[in-house]
Image (cartoon, rainbow, N blue to C red):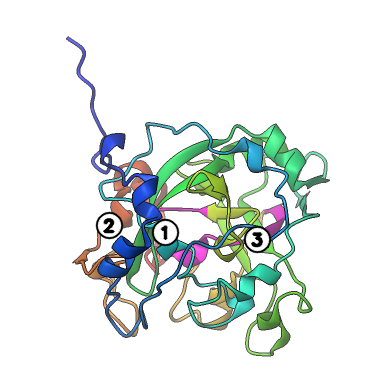
Amino acid sequence: MLIRHRETWSIAERDATPEHVFLNRRSFVAGAALAGAALGTGIIGLPRGAMAAGEVDPSASLYPAKANPAYTISQAVTPEAVNTNYNNFYEYGETKHIADAAQALKIRPWMVSIDGMVDKPKEIAIDDLLKAMPLEERLYRHRCVEAWSMAVPWTGFPVKALVDFAKPLGSAKYMQVQTFLDPKMAPGQRGFVYTWPYVEGLTMAEATNDLAFMVTGAYGKPLPKAMGAPLRLALPWKYGFKSAKSIVKITFTDKRPTTFWQGLASNEYGFWANVNPGVPHPRWSQATEEVLGTSERRPTMIYNGYAEKVAALYTDIKGENIFM
């Protein structure tokens, strides 16, 4: 007798919200009461595309990619209109309402450089990288450090596939990612408060974990600019600020990177940033989260519900707060 064991965080694909519901503006408006001071006011609007009017994304024919049934989630997918209109993208402003401003992001040509402790440094155009990687769709939860959450059908490829492509040396301990730096294109980079470009980092064990995902699309289409086109991270067991957007450089190193938010406020944002309801942010609780697109506030799960996949990565770490 064949018995199939599902992960604790998975549901049948039939339970995911169909796309016609994502696009139903009236349904979205009826259910989009986003509560809490951290959330601000609710967003009402139609999805923004990845390209401006008249532009053609050369990767469009690659979507939708085949769904990977090993990666499903225990909640309905957040409406596309919510996720494409409610984002943190500080390069384009400090509010969540940056979808229009983010259309200034020029995503072609887009080069990704790979350097540091690798067999051979290289630079590759995003469309060539897409052709070299095995694209698939995964349904993931996303938990922001600000105590809101969403669920997204990401398209992309495992970070491990990129690591294999990069061929890092055995002495490399970390993978550092860096986003674009172009103050002419991104008004948020013109000030003096933040230290640009945005830098994030993972241990090699984290980067090669099955859950770590390089995102190139969402909702069966190329990734919208407001969500970090054309290349971003998805690390569903960590707070969302670890999932860097609009990546242009990947460096393998034996020194732990000082990440963007860690450099600005190390007392509030650490290197690890794993989700834990029992470890509050210095200024608010992490015990519960507001589910975007609904009026629901629900309990937060340890490692955002992915503990069985990632908890073993941190068992030997001593003397550090792995949850902030």
Which portion, as a residue range, is magenta?
Answer: 234-253
Q: Report helix, strand or loop for mark 1.
A: loop
Residue type, numbered disc 3: Ser
Residue 238 shows which numbered tag?
1
Decide which of 322, 60 is in the foreground and name it.
60
Q: Of the residues under marks 2 and 3, which one precedes in the sequence?
A: 3
The answer to whether mark 3 and mark 1 are in CB contact below 8 A is no
Q: Report helix, strand or loop for mark 2.
A: helix
* 3D distance between C-alphas at marks 3 and 1: 18 Å
Residue 268 shows which numbered tag?
none
**Residue appearing at x 65%, y 43% in the figure:** 60
Q: Of the residues under marks 3 and 1, which one precedes in the sequence?
A: 1
Density class for disc 1 (Cα within 10 Å; few <14, some 14-19, many ≥20) is many
**Residue appearing at x 63%, y 83% in the figure:** 194
The answer to whether mark 2 and mark 1 are in CB contact below 8 A is no
Q: Is residue 238 magenta?
A: yes
Q: Quadrant of the C terminus?
A: bottom left
Q: Which residue is mark 3?
A: 246
Q: x, y percentage for residue 113?
A: 78, 52
Left or right: where does residue 6 sit relative to residue 160? left
Q: x, y percentage for residue 244?
A: 57, 62
Q: Is residue 296 magenta?
A: no
The mark closer to the camera, 3 or 1, is 3
Residue type, numbered disc 2: Ile
Decide which of 201, 21 is in the foreground and name it.
21
Q: Which residue is mark 2?
A: 302
